[in-house]
Image (spheres, grey):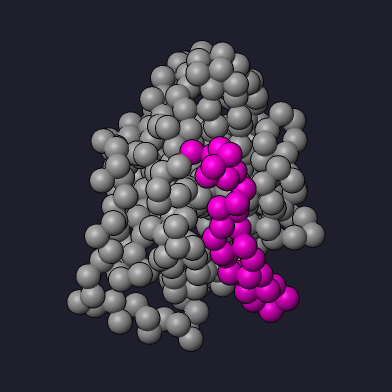
Amino acid sequence: MTNSLRLPAGSAGADGFRLAITPKDAGWSYSSLRVLELAAGESAEFSTGDSECIVLPLAGACRVTVDGRTFELAGRTDVFARVSDFAYAPRDAEVTVHSAEGGRFALPAARCERRLEPAYGPAEKVSVETRGAGNATRQVNNFASPEGFGCDRLVAVEVLTPDGNWSSYPPHKHDERGEGEAVLEEIYYFELGRTDGADPGPESGPVSQRIGYQRVYADGVDLLEEVRHGDAVLVPRGYHGPSMAAPGYPMYYLNVLAGPHPERTMACCDDPAHHWVRASWEGMPTDPRVPMCDAEGPR
């Protein structure tokens, strides 16, 4: 396993990918994630091998060809602009991603047994869910949740948190199989915005200056670190949360999960010390900034 659970942006690239986390890299068996950046007119080709994979635009549009079948992804300008469409590639497939104008694309994946059919996921069919209340309100885009899309093992969702709010809270874990809990290997991939909508530049500063915070803890695991745009955090075990969006910087994270459970699930259990917080949300209004966007654009 890597020596650190946090992988700073640009520190874990390989084979032409800006970020490349394999099960071997993480020291586990199923979950993986790559992030692909393409210049205008550029293409990338790869094999899925023993893993199913989703091509999810983070910024930009692309054409995805899977074993000769082509899907046009409208994508989005950035992760806060709208919910994106996506393409599914099964294991043992050949994939080409081409972007006419360039862009950034996440490739969440999971080792699996069954070989399903290539498929297109329309943005309009992605369930947008509001979770929490008060300053723990956040948006979940269930594009590849167990109920949202039919993969074999892969589970993936996007979470958007308004600046100043706490997300992934109460802290929860999924490292034991039992009542209401399954074993899942999880990756967090972060992107951060600005409330003024400024693009990176001399006056607004680079995206690397945008900050948030992430907590992961268990016996032998203790992480509370600043996370920046493009960082990833591995969760091999233990409680994780909160994910904290600093004032001025709305937070996006992509969750990639998979494990040995025979059915796809996101079953987890809260840290008993903080489970009571859920009851405190009853009757509390949600943050009116959520949902932050949907398939039609910003809200």
Residue 135 vs residue 23, the one in the foreground: 135
Q: Residue at x 56, y 13 (%)?
A: 41
Residue 275 % position (x, y): 41, 81
64 on left or right of 290? right
Q: Residue at x 52, y 44 (%)?
A: 204
* Residue 264 visible in the current orientation: no
Q: In the image, which residues are magenta?
A: 199-228
Q: Residue at x 50, y 18 (%)?
A: 101
Image position of 250 with respect to 152: above or below = below
155 on left or right of 219? left
Screen quadrant of the N terminus: bottom right
Residue 107 % position (x, y): 56, 36
Residue 296 vs residue 146, the one in the foreground: 296
Image position of 116 with respect to 269: above or below = above
Residue 193 % position (x, y): 47, 48
* Residue 225 visible in the current orientation: yes
229 on left or right of 250? right
Residue 104 vs residue 206, the one in the foreground: 206
Name, please, the residue furthest toward the left.
Answer: 283
Image position of 248 with respect to 53: above or below = below
Residue 35 vs residue 206, the one in the foreground: 206
